[in-house]
Image: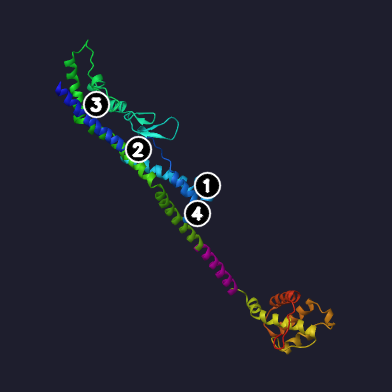
Amino acid sequence: MAEIKELVAKANEQCKRIKDYIAENEGMFDSMDLKLHDASFYEYRNMEKEFPLCYADNEECSENSYFYRFCNSTYDQFTDWCAEEKIDFRAMCHHIGRTSSFYLYDKDLVQRENGRINWSWTMYNIFNELGYSNYYQLLEFDNEGNVDEEESFKCNEDYYTREEWIEELKPALQYIVDDMYDDFIREIEDVKKVYEYIKDTKNNQVEYFKEFLEWNEDDLQYEKDKRDKEMAKRKEIIKDKQFLNWQKLGLNEADIEKIKNQFVSILRDIKSSMQNKELTNTVATAEAIKTIRDALSDKPASDITSDDVANAVAFYMGQTTDLNDKGLTMVQELAKYIFDNSVPEERSDDHW
């Protein structure tokens, strides 16, 4: 009898090791979910300030926000990792009803009652799930998770004597002493890997989300810089085309460009001289003014129209330049426009 008592004591030591491990890593056996609340709050609270391009882009694609994309990307990375580790996450994941919460073990090892671990059920499950079929339902465990000697040593006297039953129990107790702790650790090896992966993701979700945003912000900045360069290049091309078009102007048109400033000043002087009834000799020479005045029809100054002045200017330009008929027509039209739309400027003593 002393031998079996010593074997029970040793078995209970191994049960305690398992209980201590579960207690120290209770989060691994507790309910959890994959929600990333902190990252979601960061998107709402800080993203605009730290990642303005992503935030602006978010406004245009709210149904596919960067947080939503981050969650999908994070989950895809997780499932890829599970595949590499040959872990069946769906089989391991035991959902609580129809909620998003779940427990992380693929066998019903750790049992809870009213939110707390039931050590009697838990140790019973571990023993029967991990032990060999020869030991199935041979042992009972008390509320502390120890071998319940009273219940375990009861035997069916129709089949066994007490001594025979104790001999049946010895291999089961020896399994607990020699192998059950190591089998348990081996059984939850994948559970521990998955738990640590999920725990790391949840603990560092904001930093991982910021890294995700930083990558996208750089990409958006690159695209923006590219668009800005293309726009600047387009503007430069337009500017160059305008220059080339000017370079391609015909001789008469080029002449008009060159003399435009000259006859604008002449027109102003003509208009001023008509109003003041005197000649000017500043920008436009008196000779030019006199020639144009002479070309005007013999009318009172008040009756002279812009058409009269435009014809006179065209006549003068025809006498003093090499413009052909097309060029003179353009000068005539421009002269009429300027004469009709110019506003008389106030004159000082030394400038018109």
Place of residue 330 in the rendered image (x, y in percent of width and height, measured from the top left): 70, 75
Q: Which label number is shown at residue 131?
A: 3
In this figure, which residue is indicated by the disc labeled 2? 27
Q: CA distance from mark 4 to mark 2?
A: 34 Å
Amino acid type, label 4: Glu
Q: CA distance from mark 1 to mark 2?
A: 34 Å
Q: Secondary structure at mark 4?
A: helix
Q: Nearer the viewer, residue 95 or 276?
A: 95
Report the magenta residues as a range: 229-247
Question: For this view, does 247 lie left or right of residue 84?
Answer: right
Q: Nearer the viewer, residue 267 or 74?
A: 74
Within-10-Å neighbours for mark 3: few <14, some 14–19, many 20+: some
For the question of whether residue 86 can be seen, the reply is no
Marks 1 and 2: CB-CB under 8 Å? no
State which mark lies toward you, 1 or 2. 2
Mark 2 and mark 3 lie on one chain; the one further toward the N terminus is: 2
The quadrant of the picture occupied by the C terminus is bottom right
Mark 1 and mark 4 lie on one chain; the one further toward the N terminus is: 4
Residue at 73% across, 89% down: 286
Place of residue 180 in the rendered image (x, y in percent of width and height, measured from the top left): 23, 30
In this figure, which residue is indicated by the disc labeled 1? 62
